[in-house]
Amino acid sequence: MQDIISVQHATKQFGKVTAVDDVSFTVHEGEVFGFLGPNGAGKSTTIKMLTTLLKPTGGTLELAGHNVVNDQDAAEEFLALCSRTLASMATSLLGIICTCMRYYTRSIKRHSRRVSKS
C-alpha cells in the first residue's frame, strides 16, 4: 500500500519556541486516521505544515509521495481538509462557502503567479 501521508522528523520553530519537535507518522492508503492530543501539542501546526500553510523548520512531509515544500503544487492535488470548525458550521451554508473560498482563492493566486512567471 502507498503511503498517503508521510511525516518524518517534522520540526517547526517560531523563534526560540519549538511548536513541533521531531514528529513522525505514516498513513497508508485506505486507512482512517485521527490526529489527537492535548492543547499545545503541535497538532494544528503539523496540519498547517502538511497543507502547505507553514514551511517546516526541519524534517520531511509528503502527500502521496510529493514533498509539500519542494513539490507543493503536486502535493496540494491530494489535499482535502475538514476541520472540526468547518464541520460544526454545517448548518451555515454561507460559513462553508466562505471557508472553501479562502482555500480556493489562495490556490488561484498561487496558480496565477506561476502562470505569470512563464
Image (tube, rainbow, N blue to C red):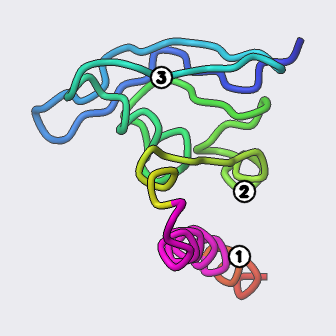
> Who's the residue at 26% across and 22% down the image?
41
Q: Amino acid at mark 3?
A: Phe
Q: Nearer the viewer, residue 83 or 10?
A: 83
> Who's the residue at 51% across and 77% down the image?
98
Q: Which residue appears farthest toward the front when viewing the image?
A: 91
- Left or right: residue 2 compared with residue 58: right
Instruction: Locate residue 97, reporting x and y percent.
Output: 58, 76
Q: Are marks 2 and 1 in contact (CB under 8 Å)?
A: yes
Residue identified by numbered label 3: 35
Mark found first going from the N terminus, 1 or 3 = 3
> Who's the residue at 71% across and 76% down the image?
111
Q: Is residue 4 above or below residue 111?
A: above
Q: Amino acid at mark 1?
A: His
Question: Which element type, helix, strand or loop, lies under badge 2?
Answer: helix
Instruction: Locate residue 93, reporting x and y percent.
Output: 56, 74
Mark found first going from the N terminus, 3 or 2 = 3
Residue 49 counted in the magenta span:
no
